[in-house]
């Protein structure tokens, strides 16, 4: 399987084109490209995409924002193991987006500081309080910072490539 990258204005190859209509959020999953998958880059050697993780919805459609970022990492020489760890962080975040608004879902383009603060509280809040279980996960702040770093890197990449606009302010 060989993909040919088109060169958009940002000169970053893109495999995924947006689907018309509203996004589908039903339980994002992790999928892997088959052995032999390659990306032909204009003026460069082919990029081997065998085993490349990607996030999909229940219909098998790729999630544009995280997949574009994961592809960017692969093109820039990140190991498959590192990309898989980052893909799992983005998968977890995508599932939380899918559950947002009482299950109505929320798109990556709608993430704001308030949502990130609620996400932090959910992940780092105590999993047991006054002897009762909570919906929080109780992870360490350093673990949350790793996840937040990847989500922000993904959003920065999405802004740089035109998938989203106005997400991240001046840094």
Image (cartoon, rainbow, N blue to C red):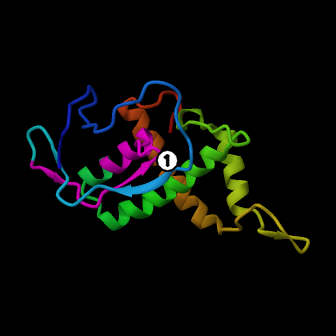
Magenta run includes residue 106: no
* Quarter-of-image position of residue 6: top left
**x, y percent for residue 161:** 35, 33
Residue visible at 15% across and 42% down? 41
Task: Look at 12% across and 37% down and name the residue there.
Answer: 42
Q: Which residue is mark 1?
A: 58
Between 171 and 128, the residue placed more toward the observer is: 128
| Magenta highlight range | 45-71
- Foreground: 143 or 131? 131
Question: Of helix, strand and loop, which one carries label 1?
Answer: loop
- Please, which residue is most extreme toward the front here? 59
For this rendering, which residue is in front, 41 or 63?
A: 63
Q: Count of labels shown?
A: 1
User: Horizontal and vertical percent for residue 65?
Assistant: 43, 40
Residue 59 is inside the magenta segment: yes
Residue lying furthest bottom? 131
Q: Position of residue 56 (x, y in %)?
A: 44, 48
Compared across the picture, whether 13 is left or right of 117 comes to left
Which residue is drawn at the image coordinates 62% and 50% (left, top)? 96
Q: Is residue 13 left or right of residue 16?
A: left
| Residue at left offset 28%, top offset 61% | 51
Q: Is residue 6 left or right of residue 22?
A: left
Q: Give coordinates of residue 145: x percent, y percent.
A: 57, 59
Q: How many residues crowd mark 1 within 10 Å: few (<14), some (14–19), many (20+)?
A: few
């Amino acid at each position: 399987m060989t993909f040919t990258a088109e060169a958009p204005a940002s000169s970053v190859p893109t495999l995924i084109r947006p689907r018309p209509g509203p996004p589908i959020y039903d339980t994002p999953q992790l999928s892997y490209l088959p052995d032999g998958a390659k990306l032909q880059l204009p003026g460069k050697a082919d990029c081997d995409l065998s085993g490349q993780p990607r996030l999909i919805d229940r219909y098998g459609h790729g999630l544009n924002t995280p997949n574009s970022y994961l592809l960017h990492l692969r093109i820039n020489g990140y190991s498959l193991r590192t990309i898989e760890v980052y893909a799992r962080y983005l998968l977890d975040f995508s599932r939380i987006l899918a559950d947002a608004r009482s299950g109505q879902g929320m798109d990556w383009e709608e993430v704001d500081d308030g949502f990130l603060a609620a996400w932090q509280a959910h992940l780092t809040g105590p999993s047991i309080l006054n002897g009762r279980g909570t919906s929080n996960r109780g992870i360490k702040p350093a673990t949350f910072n790793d996840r937040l770093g990847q989500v922000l890197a993904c959003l920065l990449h999405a802004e740089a490539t035109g998938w989203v606009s106005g997400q991240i302010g001046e840094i």
